[in-house]
């Protein structure tokens, strides 16, 4: 029985001690709990609250920016090509004295390119068309 009495006295002293210290203790502030990437930013509405969706901005169709139409490349002057590029190896008399079909001119011009004449594919097509028109069969 004495033990129980001392136990009650000890508890009462402990309670009194804690009660006396509680008035002098500064409140502790715990740091906010870190939010996980999956935690909601705002609390979800309760079923009793009405959820009103926010208005979505309307998509507007705007015409694409006016692009300037590219001007066509300047037409290739096939006569100038003939004078500038073909006369590096032979005279114009050789060309002017020949009468060939477009296919034959294609073979001739292709052979000249293989021998070193410098023509782009576009220039080659223009030159063949010119030769066939001017010196064709």
Image: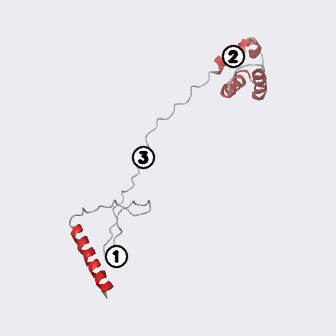
Identified at 75% across, 19% down, the residue is 116
Q: Which mark is residue 63?
A: 3
Q: Quadrant of residue 46?
A: bottom left
Can you identify the residue that label 2 sits on?
Answer: 85
Q: Secondary structure at mark 1?
A: loop
Identified at 25% across, 63% down, the residue is 27
Q: Which mark is residue 125?
A: none
Q: Secondary structure at mark 2?
A: helix
Sequence order check, earlier mark of 2 and 3: 3
Real-space CA distance between mark 2 and mark 3, rounded to the nearest whole angstrom: 48 Å
Quadrant assignment for the N terminus: bottom left
Q: Are marks 1 and 3 in contact (CB under 8 Å)?
A: no
Sequence order check, earlier mark of 2 and 1: 1
Instruction: Locate residue 129 relative to residue 5 in the image: left or right.
Output: right
In this rendering, does residue 70 appear at all?
Answer: yes
Q: Are marks 2 and 3 in contact (CB under 8 Å)?
A: no
Q: Quadrant of residue 73?
A: top right
């Amino acid at each position: 029985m004495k033990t129980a009495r001392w136990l009650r006295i000890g508890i009462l002293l402990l309670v009194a001690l804690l009660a006396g210290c509680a008035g002098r203790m500064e409140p502790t502030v715990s740091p906010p709990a870190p939010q996980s990437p999956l935690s909601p930013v705002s609390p979800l509405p309760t079923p009793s609250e009405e959820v009103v969706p926010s208005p979505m901005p309307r998509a507007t169709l705007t015409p694409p920016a006016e692009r300037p139409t590219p001007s066509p490349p300047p037409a290739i002057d096939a006569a100038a090509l003939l004078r500038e590029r073909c006369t590096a190896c032979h005279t114009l008399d050789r060309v002017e004295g020949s009468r060939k079909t477009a296919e034959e001119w294609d073979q001739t011009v292709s052979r000249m390119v293989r021998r070193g004449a410098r023509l782009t594919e576009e220039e080659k097509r223009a030159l063949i068309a010119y030769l066939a028109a001017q010196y064709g069969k």
